[in-house]
């Protein structure tokens, strides 16, 4: 099998698929690994896929110029966001200024990327997505907008942002604004689909899927929570058990970043009274990013950098692949359900959530406690 980057290390950014003039590349998702496979009968050895692949052609990483923590001044945008609403505010501001926004949406059972300049569509980008999103087809669309002198705001994972910057020529970068997320790692969409099937949901029939509401983690399907506590899928994600192999060797899990702006959660913040509303961590790498932040309706505060990094290990190193990860994929590939797999690997975590569920239902504790 001929692949674009090192075998089993593809991050699934799809830039190679979009740039290939012969449509010779297919990204194979085997749940544990992604591989960008090249059809040698179609390949003309142009090398474009190698040039655009972040694993083979790493873009420049930039040390942050400024570190902030903060939140949007819009109560509405902050309420619909997982954290402090920075992304939601940037999206609204950018569209109002006449620009286009590109980010991940959940649509027809898939997590794909969409571009819009319509304010009424901005809400579909809100919320964390604890799954690997698919940007296939979006890079040429962004390129066309930039060629027509349109401004584009891209919000995605660092690997996707890196694929985008490799896809777009230097001459067209001026109107492109890139925001990346502090990413733990991402599991294949196949795991999510499998888990939902096991709890009697078909992902294709779901219209709304939420992974988190502020500090409360757990799947909410069509506005209804399946469990009163964390479910097996959420536990697997939070414990770093189900990411694709490349995530444990992520090149972007460090303080130097690939985008104009980086956003995440300000875990460990001293603004304790604001936590229930959400407080974001913001890293700004470029003057262009700084101007965008200052022109947006945000409350920006200083942050203790050492504390911020200590509470976001992805700014120091990737998630660690433990023996539990190997067990997870071994059990899953053997046909065991996601719930039973997590029960075997993390029995104490499951027991704690079962007890918590009972206490919540009895009204002894609130959902966010414990």
Image (cartoon, rainbow, N blue to C red):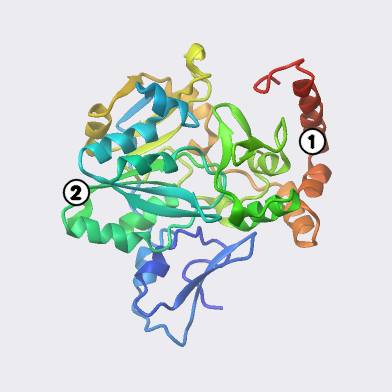
Q: Residue 152 at what x, y percent from top left? A: 26, 48
Quadrant containing the C terminus in the rendered view: top right
The 10 Å Cα crowd at callout 1, few under 14, some 14 to 19, many 20 or more, is: many
Res 42 quadrant in image: bottom left
Residue at screen point 23% across, 57% down: 145
Res 245 quadrant in image: bottom right
Q: Is residue 160 left or right of residue 206?
A: left
Q: Residue 159 at what x, y percent from top left? A: 44, 52
Q: Is residue 41 above or below residue 60?
A: below
Is 362 or 334 nearer to us in this picture?
A: 362
The 10 Å Cα crowd at callout 2, few under 14, some 14 to 19, many 20 or more, is: few
Residue at screen point 36% across, 23% down: 74
Q: Which residue is mark 2?
A: 174
Q: Secondary structure at mark 1?
A: helix
Q: Is residue 166 above or below residue 324?
A: below
- Labels 2 and 1: the sequence-earlier one: 2
Is 212 or 15 nearer to us in this picture?
A: 212
Residue at screen point 77% across, 25% down: 356
Q: Is residue 141 visible?
A: yes
**Label 2 vs label 1, nearer the camera:** 1
Is 168 or 322 nearer to us in this picture?
A: 168
Q: Which residue is mark 1?
A: 350
Q: Residue 107 at what x, y percent from top left? A: 49, 53
Quadrant containing the N terminus in the rendered view: bottom right
Q: Residue 287 at what x, y percent from top left? A: 22, 36
Q: Which mark is residue 144?
A: none
């Amino acid at each position: 099998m001929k692949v674009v980057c090192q075998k089993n290390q593809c991050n699934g950014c799809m830039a190679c698929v979009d740039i290939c003039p012969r449509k010779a590349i297919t990204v194979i998702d085997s749940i544990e690994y992604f591989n960008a496979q090249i059809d040698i009968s179609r390949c003309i050895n142009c090398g474009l896929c190698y040039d655009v692949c972040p694993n083979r052609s790493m873009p420049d990483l930039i040390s942050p110029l400024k570190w902030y923590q903060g939140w949007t001044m819009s109560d509405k945008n902050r309420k619909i966001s997982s954290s402090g609403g920075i992304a939601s505010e940037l999206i609204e501001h950018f569209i109002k200024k006449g620009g286009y926004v590109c980010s991940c949406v959940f649509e027809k059972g898939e997590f794909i990327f969409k571009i819009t300049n319509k304010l009424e569509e901005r809400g579909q980008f809100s919320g964390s997505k604890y799954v690997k999103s698919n940007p296939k087809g979006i890079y040429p669309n962004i390129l066309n907008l930039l060629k027509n002198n349109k401004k584009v705001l891209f919000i995605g994972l660092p690997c996707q942002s890196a694929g985008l910057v490799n896809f777009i020529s230097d001459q067209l970068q001026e109107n492109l604004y890139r925001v990346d997320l502090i990413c733990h790692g991402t599991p294949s969409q196949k795991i999510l689909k499998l888990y939902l099937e096991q709890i009697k949901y078909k992902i294709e029939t779901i219209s709304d899927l939420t992974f988190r509401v502020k500090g409360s983690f757990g799947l909410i399907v069509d506005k209804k929570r399946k469990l009163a506590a964390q479910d097996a899928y959420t536990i697997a994600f939070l414990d770093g058990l189900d990411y694709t192999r490349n995530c444990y060797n992520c090149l972007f899990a460090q303080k130097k970043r690939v985008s104009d702006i980086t956003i995440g959660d300000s875990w460990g913040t001293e603004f304790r009274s604001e936590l229930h509303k959400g407080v974001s961590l913001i890293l700004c790498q470029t003057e262009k990013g700084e101007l965008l932040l200052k022109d947006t309706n945000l409350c920006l505060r200083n942050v203790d950098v050492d504390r911020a990094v200590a509470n976001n290990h992805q700014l120091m190193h990737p998630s660690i692949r433990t023996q539990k990860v190997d067990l997870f994929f071994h059990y899953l590939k053997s046909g065991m359900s996601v719930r039973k797999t997590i029960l075997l690997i993390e029995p104490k975590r499951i027991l704690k959530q079962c007890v918590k569920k009972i206490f919540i239902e009895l009204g002894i504790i609130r959902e966010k406690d414990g």
